[in-house]
Amino acid sequence: MINMKRRTFLKGTVAAGAVGTAVGAGLLTPRMVMAAWPSAAFEAKSVDSVLDTLLGSHELEGSDKISIRAPDIAENGAVVPVSVTTEIANPESISIVAEKNATPLTASFLLGAGAEGFVSTRIKMGQTSSVIAVVKADGKIYSTGKEVKVTIGGCGG
């Protein structure tokens, strides 16, 4: 039993040393292992500019094949649970936008081929606003929305 713990410790130490050496030599950089980040879209100040930056267009088509689940009244705007489900075939991405936030884009998910059209997260909302679910599928952009009332602001309110 003691030998197994020693072996596990030695294996972990050797693995950590190898990763440390690779990082030190510049063979493995943090930028290479991080996901792509659409920073311009997250810094945009209006819904139209978010959609133009993120998806290339702000022309949305309403769809009853998208459902958004969020509370009618969010007691704390710092943690508002939101789930988006779509029945649209071949969804490429799902994004969540809070219209009156200082930076409206709250979440964006790229979906792999054959992925189910479902995401669930918690967002911050500064004030009562429309929460818009945007789904890109087969080159078209679809959306639906829901009004969420915020009693205590989460973005500095």
Image (cartoon, rainbow, N blue to C red):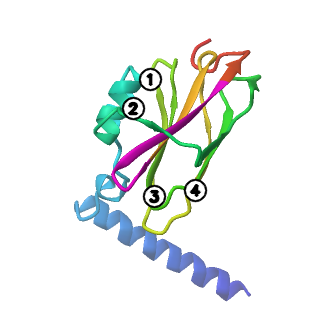
What kind of residue is marked 4?
Glu
The image position of residue 129, as x and y in percent, is: 60, 19
Q: Within the magenta stretch, is there residue 63?
A: no
Q: What whole-number distance in Å separates the C-alpha atoms at marks 4 and 3?
A: 14 Å
Label 1 environment density (alpha carbons within 10 Å; few <14, some 14–19, many ≥20): many
What kind of residue is marked 1?
Thr
Q: Do the residues labelled 4 and 3 touch (CB within 8 Å)?
A: no
Rendered residue at 41%/35% (across/down): 60
**The disc label shown at residue 115, or none:** none
| Nearer to the camera, 46 or 79 | 46
Q: What whole-number distance in Å separates the C-alpha atoms at marks 2 and 4?
A: 26 Å
Closer to the camera: disc 4 or disc 3?
A: 4
* Residue underneath mark 1: 103
Label 4 environment density (alpha carbons within 10 Å; few <14, some 14–19, many ≥20): some
Q: What whole-number distance in Å separates the C-alpha atoms at marks 1 and 4?
A: 28 Å
What kind of residue is marked 3?
Leu
N-term-proximal mark, 1 vs 4? 4
Bounds of the magenta span? 136-147
N-term-proximal mark, 4 vs 3? 4
Closer to the camera: disc 2 or disc 3?
A: 3
Rendered residue at 30%/34% (across/down): 53
* Residue underneath mark 3: 111
* Residue underneath mark 2: 42
Whether 146 is drawn above or below 122: the answer is above
Closer to the camera: disc 1 or disc 3?
A: 3
Q: Does dot 3 land on a helix, a strand or a loop?
A: loop
| Nearer to the camera, 45 or 118 | 118
* Residue underneath mark 4: 87
